[in-house]
Image (cartoon, grey):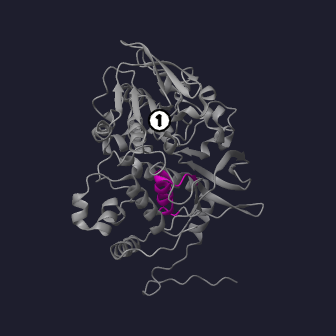
Amino acid sequence: MNQTTRISPPGLAALEARVAADLEALMLPPRPWVPAMERAGQRVLDVAVVGAGMNGIAATGSLLLKGIGQVLMLDENAPGQEGPWVTWARMDTLRSPKTLPGPCFGLPSLTFRAYYAALHGEAGWEALYKIPNAVWQDYLGWVTRTLALPVRHRARVARLEPAEGLLRLVLEDGAALLARRVVWATGRAGAGGLAWPEGLVDRAALGPLVSHASAPVDFAALRGKRLAVIGGGASSWDNAATALERGAASAEMFVRRATLPQVNKGRGSSGPAFHWGWGELDDAQKWALIAYMHDHQAPPPHETVHRALRLPGFRIHLGSPTLATRREGEEVVLTLGGADPREVRADHLIVGTGFRVDLDHAPELAAFAPHAAKWKHRHQPAPGLERPEMAEFPYLGPAFELVPRGPEAPPELGRIHLLNYGAHASHGGIASDIPGVAVAAERLATALVGRFFREELPAMRAELEAFDEPELETTPFFVPRPKKG
């Protein structure tokens, strides 16, 4: 749906022909096998995938390639604006190595490397250091178009409701869709929104003088201005650098830590063992790893640090926790603690405090969130391993589904599958980081095949019984069945 006709460059056209040949050789996609469903004359989707970014593409492709045919992606953005890559992700390149395959569904012809080499040749591939954000966005769009994945853009889901065994997706324009299952592939902020330091930043008082590092920022308005940034994570560095590159007079970062984290444990936990093996761990084992990863925060990539350090006007202040903020006229005043307590003034403040995971703050899921179990409802950590922030993560089943907190939960709750950062505690990093995206989608699709097959077993049994293709008809051992009547 809504696929724009494009003429591909010769190298890419040849690759697209190779993709088609690979799919044909594998007999993919198979004939859709889930029986069609209607209610009150309205077609019911097998699966609605909310979000057409990286995880949504991977989930939709995996489902279609397993014969689950009535699938539709819904994305609130315009084509080419899905996900963070050309909107609020302000690094120059992806953090991950260029060799990551992407959502390729096991096909070498669908990998990022094949795509890039088709456009730039093997010499271009060898010369590439890391993947520019916009190039990754183009690649994801190419996968969507090449596989003709069904997507509806500018379709924001305002709320999800139970609908007598189904799920109703109410769109912002008032239209509604019915689906048997919903995959919530809404990215880093999709399980609770942005994390704001409550009690430290009064957004109402600061008004237009404050922005979040992972939200829209009017950098043009910061030209010639003094910028203050709270936080030392990668997004804080990215925003400071972006502001300076676009003409800000200065950008000063204020970081609570006396030293930055040194080792990215996320990269150390990326690979088949963690991606495929996480689900075999019991809750105590998962929690111990969660707590370890939580305590070892990732450092900013060295490329990001060098980008900021080479820009005039950049300064970082370690061991300088922000204790309070206030507005005075058109200035933001930060009260700093640490070894050098003081007040500093800026024309604008960017808060780099990441994302919150708490479904109680996801308004689209308000009908279900109070009934969905969190980790704090299912696991009591050993002494010393309590992590209140992580305890708010949803506790998910093997198909990434929400599980009930108690008997009063609507039965449709388990038909919502959370394929975003909210899955981190239950499934590891596969639903939030690029290296694991294909694993997450494959596990989700495989699990949903089982769910649909179990639900449709009578129809599948009837189809099996109706299968009547005589194998021995051309041999001497063929036994004709008696004619009816």
Q: Is residue 277 left or right of residue 86?
A: left
Q: Is residue 29 above or below residue 383?
A: below
Magenta segment includes 472: no
| Crowding near the residue tagged with mark 1, few <14, some 14–19, many ≥20 C-alpha atoms within 10 Å | some
| Amino acid type for the residue under numbered disc 1 | Lys
- Coordinates of residue 246 in the picture (x, y in percent): 42, 45
Q: Is residue 333 above or below residue 263?
A: above
- Looking at the picture, tell me which residue is in the foreground, 73 or 460: 73
- Coordinates of residue 295 in the picture (x, y in percent): 37, 24
Residue 92 in view in this figure: yes
What residue does disc 1 label? Answer: 225
User: Which residue is depicted at the point 46% across and 41% down?
Assistant: 223
Name the secondary structure under disc 1: loop
Q: Quadrant of the N terminus?
A: bottom right
Find the magenta span and give its range. Answer: 49-67
User: Which residue is depicted at the point 44% across and 30% down?
Assistant: 229
- Looking at the picture, tell me which residue is in the foreground, 461 or 448: 448
Please tell me in which quadrant of the rendered image residue 123 appears: bottom left
- Coordinates of residue 91 in the picture (x, y in percent): 38, 45
Please tell me in which quadrant of the rendered image residue 128 appears: bottom left
